[in-house]
Amino acid sequence: MELESLPLESLPDEVVAQIEVRDRWRRATAAGGLEFLVTDIGRWPLGKTVRVAFLDGNDQLHADIAQATKQITDACNLTLDFGQNGGGTFRRWSEDDTELAAEIRVSFDLPGFFSLVGTDSTDSVIGAGGGPVGGNPGQRSLNLGQFVSNRPTQWEGTVRHEFLHALGFHHSHQNMRGTCEGEFRWEDEVGYVPTQNQAGVFVADAHGRLPGIYTFLAGERNKWPRAKVDHNLRTVDAPDLVAGPFDTKSVMLYRFPSFFYKSTPSSCAPAGDGQNLSDGDKRGLDLLYPHARDGLADRQARAGAVLESLGAGPEGHPGANGGDLAEVYRSRVEELATAQAAGVS
């Protein structure tokens, strides 16, 4: 049995490292306001108009992507503004920008698909050392590789998947309420002899024994070390994450090859079409960006706790324009605390 290579979405390693350092500091600093700082600060204010801009691609591609996101904005109290004018031209951004042209900065030129999660798209700490991806004006926050020349068959689902990341969603296979942690076949079958085809993909050995996920993803095209597999696939069991019921129809649930699972059919495998938002996706959007005022006072109380507890930022991670990182997050918390009331209809 020959296995095909599997390109998975993944942020650059240096960006992931910066996010992990930042999140450790947030958790250590937030004290009683932990949930607000790590969860609420990662979502956009209720009712906010989030601007989107494109680095490359033509107007027709931009129009198609804007249309594909309508399912998302129809389900929540948030607006995505693509800057379309009467002539059908959409907002653009440049790598030379010194001010943010948009909160979500889309490109099509890097390999693969990925997005920063929620307000990481404007977090100056992410990508502070330079590079093509980060939260600063001249950096990509969302990439749809090869859409210019070769869109995937189910490209609308890919667009919705990445834009849900941009609004604060994580992968469903990492949901602590799901079954994927126990269903994934992490290790090689007993006696497996590492065997690669000409393309460098780990395949079944001469006796038909299969590689496990760790071995398979160490080969082409991913070349992931064990720690990166854990970061991208292992269940996230953290008290500060908003996690709804595990939803097999969600567009946020990855479609893995059958050998990734211990059983067939697997309870971790997707049951949706991979294109359209599930009812669970829509409920999640309404949870993050509700139209009702319920819970607003609690969020504002948590914001107050955070403002009381914020201390100095992590060493080597200055805020915008070299300022104090704590001030960056203090300003963001204040913005959320005041803007949410105005944004609820």
Image (cartoon, rainbow, N blue to C red):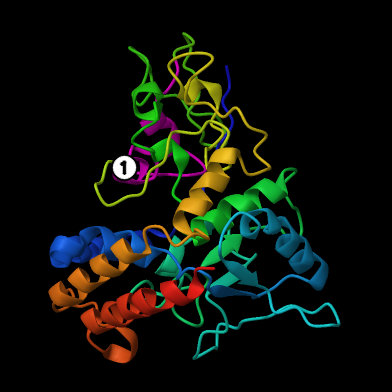
Q: Residue at x 25, y 84 (%)?
A: 327
- In the image, residue 23 above or below residue 48: above
Magenta residues?
210-235
Q: Please identify the quadrant where the C terminus is shown.
A: bottom right
Secondary element under disc 1, as helix, strand or loop, is: loop
Residue 211 colored magenta? yes
**Of residues 303 and 242, which is closer to you in this image?**
303
Q: Residue at x 51, y 81 (%)?
A: 138
Q: Is residue 59 visible?
A: yes
Pointer 1: what residue? 236
Q: Residues within 10 Å of mark 1 (few under 14, many from 20)?
A: many
- Residue positioned most to the right: 87
Q: Residue at x 24, y 80 (%)?
A: 325
Q: Is residue 135 visible?
A: no
**Of residues 179 and 1, which is closer to you in this image?**
179
Q: Please identify the quadrant where the N terminus is shown.
A: top right
Residue 10 location, x and y as percent? 46, 52
Residue 234 colored magenta? yes
- Residue positioned most to the top: 207
- Which three-letter amino acid code belongs to the residue tagged 1? Val
Q: Quadrant of residue 257?
A: top right
Residue 106 location, x and y as percent? 60, 69
Residue 219 location, x and y as percent? 45, 37
Q: Residue 276 vs residue 95: left or right?
A: right
Residue 27 location, x and y as percent? 19, 60
